[in-house]
Structure formats: C-alpha cells, structure tokens
Amino acid sequence: MSSFGGGGMPPKPNANSNLPLAGIKVVEFSGLAPGPFVGMVLADFGADVIRIDKTRTGLNPDSLCRGKRSFAVSPKSADGHALITQLVRTADIVIDPFRPGVLERLGLGPTDFEKEINKGLIFARLTGFQRTGPYANMAGHDINYIALSGVLSMLGNAGGKPQPPSNLLGDFAGGSMICLLGILLALVERARSSQGQIVEADMVTGARYVSSFVLLSSYLSHPSWGAIHSDGTDDTRGRNTLDGGAPWYGVYACKDGGYMSVGAIEPQFYKELLDILRKVLPQAPQGTQHPSPSTQHDRDTWPELQRYFAACFAQLPRSEWERHFIRTDACTVPVLTRDEAALQGVLPAASAESVSDGNPVIPSPAPRLTRTPATPPSGSAGGEWEEESAEMLLTPGEHTDDILLELGISDGKKRIELYRSDAVDGPDRPEGLTKAKL
C-alpha cells in the first residue's frame, strides 16, 4: 500500500471544546440508519465525525448526518486505502456497520490497526444478526432481528399476528443505543488501561437486552395485576396488563378523530381517571355504566370496561379531554402528531412558522447535561435549533478537499491525481475531470 505524509488530523474547525466528547475523532463507514445514528449522537456531543462515503456517487440518503463531514474515498484503491489507514491512525473510534468480514477483506478490520497502528482504537462493529451462527452472513432488517430475539412474538393485538413497532426496537434501541453504550464504556476503560478494544453489538442480542423487563416479567404473575406480558404465543399476546389487554392501558379515539392515551396502572391513578370521567360525564354513555375502582383487575369485566372507555372518550374532542386531564395524576394525555409534538409536546418547542412551512424539526439531543449540554452542531436542519442554512443531507465527498489538506496532501498535482484515479471524490473535483455520477 502507498502512504502519505503529514501527521494526524487537527480538531474539527470551530469545534466546541466544552462538549463532553470534544477532541474525540470518529471514522464512520457509511451505512444504513443504525450506524449513522451512532455517529450522529457522538457528533451531537462534540466528537469530530468523518463519514467515509463511496466514490462515484452523488447521493447518500442518510438523514442522520448532522455535525459530520464526508470524505468520499475508495478503499479498493491503494491510495484510497492508505488515506483511510491514515485517518484511522489518529482516530479514537471506528464505526463498522457492515456484515461480518467486509472490512476485514479490505484490510481495514480491527486486527489491521490494533497492534502497531493504533493501540487505543475502539472498533465498534454493529451488525443485525449475531456475528456467528447460521444467520451471520444473511441480509436482514429490524423486523428479522427482533423476530429472532423472541420479542416480536410478544407484540401485537389479541387474536392477531405479531406486529413490529416500526424499526425502533431492533435498529435503534437494540442496535444504535447498545453500540453507543459499548463505545462509551470502552472510552472509560481506555482512560485506565490506555488500550482500545472491539465493541461487538448486534441487534438480536441488543433487542433482547433492552427488553429484559418484558422478557423476565413474562414468566411472572403479579399478585394484583395477573400476567403482565405475553409469552409470545397466540393465546397470550395482547391480553395482559402492559401489552394492550388491559382497558386502562391503551389508546382511545375522541369525537374529533384525535386520540388520548391512558396508562392508569396503579389503583390511585385508576381511581382518579374514573373520578374525572364521572365528573365530566355524570351520565355514563348509553349502554354503559360507571365502573367501580375495585373491579380494575377483574378480567371478566375488561370487555365491558373497554366499551365504557371507548364510549366516554368518543363524547368529546381531544382538546376538551386535554383540558380535563392536564395537571392530574390520571395518567391520561393526548396522542400528538409529529408536528403537534414539535410545537407543544417537548421543550424547547419549535416555532409555529417553521412547522407550518413544513421544515424538518430535529429532536433535541438527550440526555441534557447541565454543565456541558449538546449544542446545535454544524449542519443541523431547522426546527428546534432554527438553523436556516442547514441541509438534511450530506453530499458524499463534501469535505474531501478539507480532509486531504488535514492529512497533509497539499500538493495540487497529487490531489488531482487522487481525483483522476477515483481514489477520492467529491463535488469539488478539479475542473476538467468527470464529476461523480448521480
């Protein structure tokens, strides 16, 4: 492999040195949503994240790219491989979103760096299936990973088939967040040992771990509540306290088509729910009667109770129910749409003008650190951060020239040759060279 001089990368220009991850350098190989989310969170809290994009492409649909820089470089070329190696030489973290063996076959796996090149490197490998076993090299998506985890079988309505909660549980909870946890733990440990390590995260194992309460409680029966969660069979799915079976833990339609969420599990909260319904509707809806708090856990009454709640909430528009339940302990709040939540469900709220114009509203980083909270990173899009010049997508190779300079490639002829050979790419290709294909 060829090599280039120039030393390590300087910190990201204008980086906020007060953020908790300031000075941490991340090389993120471009992938689908879970890997980019890991890099985005690290960038939100101050890390300098460089996304490695393919050459000869003009579009990457990744919307989780704020605060990052893009370097379009080909690992299959000798020069491109050398550039990536130089990046990793001074990096703290590498994010590998590929199936097992992809980076290893390119000579860019953890063993290629950990001994001589970068002993402190934290190499985070995030896969869908576990890295060993019959599924290891198969294609898959969130629904497949949570299917193998055992958790999908527990989700869904009574009498129906298992139903996935969008792609949140496997991709992001069991994948991204578990990977982030591993990275941060490895950083803490490195402060003691000065040694990096491999972080192995997969969405099957991760989904099971974040679902520990659901899985473990499915073996138990509460003395008052009875079964809390399904065991994954058709006979139990959607029929229990927290999986949609209990009438006082569900969603109900209002007169105007809006919805209210009810989660009055504990007896004191359930009593308050019933008291408010009785006060607002002294006469129970036709065909129903006001229930007694004492029958909350009598499952024989649940069908009738379900009809009662449905009939009650159908009497008034959502705004009226909001007014009656706000600042109470009835555990009953409105189901807000995407735009409603941006305006009134969270603080700080987005501007009404931004939402009405259809601008993307970025969720604020969480958790909020009191001394070193995340600040709007460069490239944030509209909404709660109101950065008008920001864009949702990051053009592949948008920062290739800047990164080449940081890597010591200042010779114009050398840079032109790198572009000409497709070792690197970007929208700033020198004039006279064919631009990347869209």
Image (cartoon, rainbow, N blue to C red):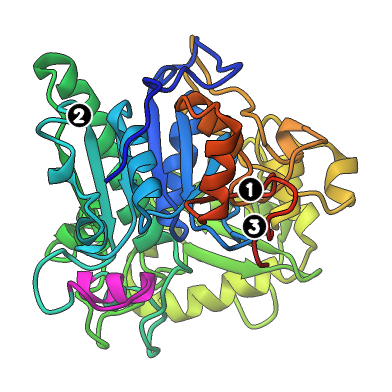
* Disc ID at residue 335: 3
Q: Earlier in the sequence, mark 1 or mark 3?
A: 3
Confirm or deny contact between disc 1 and disc 2 (CB under 8 A).
no
23 lies above or below 278: above
* Element type where label 3 sits in the image: loop
Q: Nearer the viewer, mark 1 or mark 3?
A: 1
- Compute the Cα span from label 3 to label 2: 49 Å
Q: Position of residue 359 (x, y in %)?
A: 81, 49
Residue in the picture at 71% in, 66% down: 283
Residue at the front extreme of this rendering:
413
Q: CA–CA distance between discs 1 and 3?
A: 33 Å
Give the structural element (helix, strand or loop) at label 1. loop
Q: Which residues are magenta?
A: 136-150
Foreground: 349 or 323?
349
Residue 174 appears in which quarter of the rendering? Answer: bottom left
Which amino acid type corresponds to the residue marked 1 in the rendered image?
Leu
Q: Which mark is residue 394?
A: 1
Residue shown at 47% from the left, 52% from the top:
423
Amino acid type at mark 2: Asn
Decide whether residue 407 is among the magenta residues: no
Q: Identify which residue, 433 or 21, lies in the foreground.
A: 433
Whether tag 3 and tag 2 are in contact, CB under 8 A, the answer is no
Q: Secondary structure at mark 2?
A: loop
Determine the residue positioned at 16% across, 30% down. 196
**Cα separation between marks 1 and 2:** 28 Å
Q: Is residue 425 left or right of residue 320?
A: left
Residue that carries the numbered disc 2 in the rendered image: 118
